[in-house]
């Protein structure tokens, strides 16, 4: 029997690495859209929620392949900033922004805000589209605090600023082995693993 394939609809190579690492023991082949030659497939994220964006990213690619597809839409929600950058985490510092510019903007927005008011959480929403077109949503969250300066050079995005609850260290310092066990994405992928396990068993 051919091994099943799961295609990742994301242009973010850091996410691809994390997802492949977390799902490495599943009895399926995990491939990115770049692996399949869809590198140039740009999908505008114009939804009003992470869910809408995740479903849009997954369904556009699902129409082009005959395999299961997932997309991940994630954001950092800071309490003091009423949930910003949230849905706009990727482009917080402007349309052509990058991780560094986003981190600088976040630090500026929280200038002089004391530690006890710097609570935040990451949220990941994964949309899974089965070969029958069925959509399943899986979510994960991770709580923490925004630090006063970047620490550590592991991970990506806001990781160097995000001090993980119960660890006293940023994801940038903790590194992939810890992050991929406890992160928002790891939690959503743990649920995905169960769903896919069921699908593989059912056949
Ligand atoms: P795709 O849409 O192609 O998957 P993206 O980078 O645009 O890639 P999102 O729309 O989900 O991804 O944007 C989320 C942004 O939030 C991302 O660019 C990072 O800046 C940040 N982010 C997401 N997950 C993160 C994580 O695990 N650690 C740190 N920052 C993260």
Image (cartoon, rainbow, N blue to C red):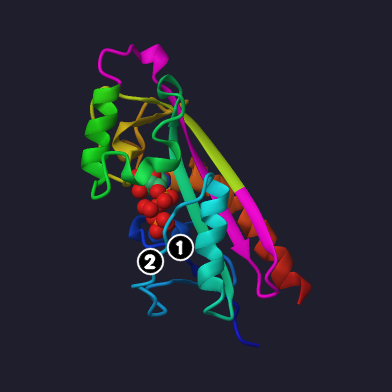
Residue 155 locus on image (x, y percent): 32, 46
Residue 197 locus on image (x, y percent): 68, 64
Residue furthest out toward the right = 202
Judging from the image, what secondary structure is the residue with disc 2 in? loop
Nearer to us in this view, 25 or 103: 103
Q: Which residue is pictured at 52% across the width and 46% down the height?
A: 50
Nearer to us in this view, 75 or 181: 75
Q: Quadrant of residue 112?
A: top left
Q: Quadrant of the C terminus?
A: bottom right
Stretch in magenta: 110-138
Kindly identify which numbered label has been placed on residue 42: 2
Specify whether tag 2 is near ligand 1 (CB below 8 Å): no
Nearer to us in this view, 46 or 155: 46
Q: Can residue 178 be spotted in the picture?
A: no
Q: Which residue is pictured at 62% across the width and 50% down the height?
A: 138
Q: Quadrant of residue 44?
A: bottom left
Name which of mark 1 and mark 2 comes first in the sequence: 1
**Left or right: residue 115 compared with residue 3:** left
Specify whether tag 1 is near ligand 1 (CB below 8 Å): no
Residue furthest out toward the bottom = 1
Residue density around tag 2, few if under 14, some if 14–19, many if 20 or more, within 10 Å:
few
Kindly identify which numbered label has been placed on residue 20: 1
Nearer to us in this view, 44 or 8: 44
Q: Can residue 30 be spotted in the picture?
A: yes
Kindly identify which numbered label has been placed on residue 112: none
Between the C-alphas of marks 1 and 2, the distance is: 21 Å
């Amino acid at each position: 029997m051919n091994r099943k394939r799961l295609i990742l609809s994301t242009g973010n190579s850091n996410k691809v690495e994390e997802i492949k690492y977390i799902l490495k023991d599943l009895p399926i082949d995990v491939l990115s859209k770049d692996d399949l030659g869809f590198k140039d497939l740009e999908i505008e994220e114009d939804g009003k929620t992470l869910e809408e964006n995740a479903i849009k990213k997954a369904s556009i690619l699902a129409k082009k392949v005959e395999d299961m597809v997932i997309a991940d839409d994630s954001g950092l929600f800071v309490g003091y900033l009423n949930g910003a950058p949230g849905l706009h985490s990727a482009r917080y510092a402007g349309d052509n922004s990058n991780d560094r510019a986003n981190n600088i903007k976040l630090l500026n927005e929280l200038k002089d805000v004391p530690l006890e008011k710097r609570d935040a959480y990451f949220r990941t929403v994964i949309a899974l589209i089965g070969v029958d077109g069925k959509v399943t949503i899986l979510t994960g969250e991770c709580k923490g605090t925004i630090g006063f300066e970047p620490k550590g050079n592991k991970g990506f995005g806001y990781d160097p600023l995000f001090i993980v609850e119960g660890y006293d260290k940023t994801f940038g310092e903790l590194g992939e082995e810890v992050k991929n066990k406890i992160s928002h994405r790891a939690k959503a992928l743990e649920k995905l693993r169960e769903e896919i396990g069921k699908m593989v068993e059912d056949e």
